[in-house]
Image (spheres, rainbow, N blue to C red):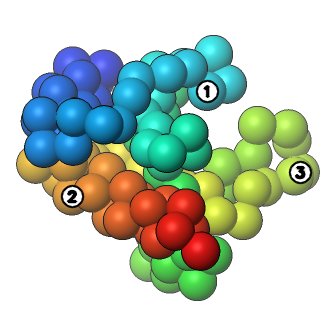
Amino acid sequence: METAVFEDASRTLLEEHPGDERGRMLQSPGLKTSGMFYAFATGNDLVVKLPAARVVELIEAGTGLPCAPRPGRPMRQWVRLTPADAEQCLAYLAEARQFVTGLATR
């Protein structure tokens, strides 16, 4: 995934949800809502926050990889993905946003 794919998808999502913000997570460009990050881009990967069961599902399907900023310490609700295009990137961003929005309202 190129950074431009993340930027295009982010722009679209931010137009739909003007209360969301850009920010930096782990020194990478990211997105947050209600003060909670739900996605960031690093290298060739999109990293999104999803329910732990969904993360396991994506990893087992070979679609995603664990997110482990520190070797051997994966973050169970974060998964690294390489979306094929901006449309697929936007779908993952929307899924992550929906999950985090649900957490914020609890």
User: In this view of the protein, which residue sits in the foreground, 10 or 14?
Assistant: 14
Tell me the distance, in whole angstroms, between the alpha carbons under discs 3 and 2.
29 Å
Residue 38 image point, x, y percent: 49, 48
Q: Earlier in the sequence, mark 3 or mark 1?
A: 1
Image mark for residue 91: 2
Provide residue 45's location: percent of width, then percent of height.
44, 37
Q: Is residue 41 visible?
A: no
Kindly tell me whether residue 13 is visible in this rendering.
yes
Closest to the observer, 14 or 48: 14
- Occupied quadrant, residue 4: top left
Q: Is residue 46 above or below residue 49?
A: above
Q: Which residue is mark 1?
A: 25
- On screen, residue 42 above or below 20: above
Q: Which residue is mark 3?
A: 72
The answer to the question of whether label 1 and label 2 lie on touching residues, with beta carbons closer than 8 A, is no
Q: Position of residue 15 (x, y in %)?
A: 12, 34
- Residue at 31% from the left image edge and 51% from the top image edge: 93
- Distance (Cα) linking label 1 and label 2: 20 Å
Q: Secondary structure at mark 2?
A: helix
Q: Depth-wise, is mark 3 or mark 2 nearer the camera?
A: 2
Determine the secondary structure under disc 1. Answer: strand
Q: For this view, does 60 lie left or right of residue 3?
A: right
Task: Please identify the quadrant where the C terminus is shown.
Answer: bottom right
- Residue 105 % position (x, y): 52, 68
Of the image marks 3 and 2, the number of the one nearer the N terminus: 3
What's the residue type where badge 1 is placed? Met
Numbered disc 3: secondary structure: loop
Q: Local crowd at mark 2 within 10 Å, few (<14), some, or many (≥20)?
A: some
Q: Is residue 23 above or below residue 98?
A: above
Q: Residue at x 49, y 21 (%)?
A: 23
- Out of 23 and 71, give the one closest to the viewer: 23
| N-terminal label among 1 and 2 | 1
